[in-house]
Image: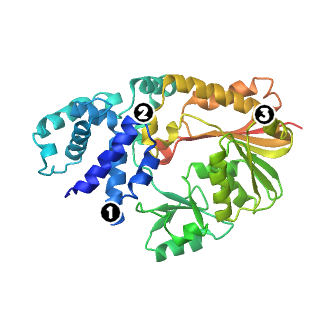
Amino acid sequence: MRFHRNLVFATLDSLKLIFNEQKQADKVLKQTLKRDKRWGARDRGFIAETTYDIVRWQRLYAKAADVKGPYSREDLFRLFAVWAVHKGHTLPNWPQFEGTPVRRIRGKFDELKSQRAYRESIPDWLDAMGIEQLGGKWEKEIHALNEQAEVVLRANTLKTNKTKLKDALEDAEIHTKSSKVCPDALILEERTNVFSLPIFKEGWFEVQDISSQQVAPLLDVKPGMRVVDACAGAGGKTLHLAALMENKGQIIATDIYDFKLAECKRRAKRAGAHNVETRFIDSPKVIKKLYGTADRVLIDAPCSGLGVLRRNPDSKWKLSPQFMEEIQELQADILARYSRMVKDGGKLVYATCSILPAENGLQVEKFLASEAGAAFKKEEERTLWPSETGYDGFYMCLLTKSN
């Protein structure tokens, strides 16, 4: 591979913002890729994939490079050199790479392979937590979570169907395959930027992982129902619910972040989802007004995001033991309060994009044993393991409320 200075420098600039200033990787790259209009798809792909790869393997590469954060410009060049050596690329004859100890770097990789925290590039405390909660299963899961995620689309049945979408993508020379699990899913055979396609702007599809696409159907919605998506965020599952309800009935999308709901509203318009109403939770009254009014409630709870590390590898460097404690307390509080929105005889789905029992099954068990959960019964529970599915890690549990 021939390295181009402007692409390497753009990669290092991105890494500096992600590592030293704790900026979100996807947002950093979105800005970086706008820098030079002359960059083609291959150039942008190099910047994005190299940046994500170095972020994903930061601990391993930093140890092999013998550097520690916050990283100087020289340190970032050393990280890049280690990445290039590890990938089998020949380093260019640039002053920044003079004297790179290629043989020593290779030896260091061989040495570090025996230690899981380096081999899988994760913090020690997270490795210990994974072993504590998942035992021997942790090894397989964290390994699977370090693999690059496939791009999966969900055909928006309010505007098209999977067959028409597949044909339109073929016309754009984008090849896809179907999923045996999700009826409206198409999996890209090669990664490409689908957001620039006219059919995306016309609302024909959303990008949504296979695991995420299994949450909304579990809620068993029907046209005409009143449904609350209690932690809607930017509305990925809200839009799926709207399609399943054929735009009939009412979906109330709530969240504590107004800017996320603004994005949800924009996406709903593009998707032609007319039965979506957003409500900003600026006081407890917003939730209380909904008590006992919903046929269905989805709680896609805030979580560690461990199940989606393949998409957001930078998040593992931002997590902390303190955050894990706080998020579990928040999950329990949300489940206790938001479950009160379910009508007698209604249904609730509690879901996370985590694989840790403390955020998942144990939360549900505590809820069911509490006064708030006394009227609920567990109907179905699923943990989607990345090592088994090849997709994101997810947990979802269907609960019904007695009449």
Instruction: In the rendered structure, find residue 284 and report the number of the disc placed on it.
Output: 3
Does dot 2 land on a helix, a strand or a loop? Answer: helix
Near-viewer residue (278 or 235) = 278
In the image, taking residue 297 as reference, residue 260 lies left or right, namely: left
The N terminus is located in which quarter? bottom left
Residue at image location 32% in from the left, 33% down from the top: 59
Q: Earlier in the sequence, mark 2 or mark 1?
A: 1
Residue 167 vs 255, above or below: the answer is below
Q: Position of residue 231 (x, y in %)?
A: 68, 42
Q: Is residue 383 visible?
A: no
> Residue 317, which numbered label?
2
Q: Which mark is residue 332?
A: none
Give whichever of 124, 35 is nearer the camera.
35
Q: Is residue 152 shown to the viewer in this render? A: yes
Q: Dot 2, how many residues are within 10 Å of its Cα: few (below 14), some (14-19), or many (20+)?
A: some
Q: Position of residue 299 (x, y in %)?
A: 69, 40
Between the C-alphas of marks 3 and 2, the distance is 33 Å
Give, as a three-letter code, the residue at label 2: Trp
57 left or right of 374?
A: left
Q: Secondary structure at mark 3?
A: helix
Q: Is residue 69 left or right of residue 250?
A: left
What type is the residue that disc 3 sits on?
Answer: Pro
| Labelled disc at residue 42 | 1
The image shows residue 2, relative to residue 218, as above or below, that is below
The image quadrant that residue 3 belongs to is bottom left
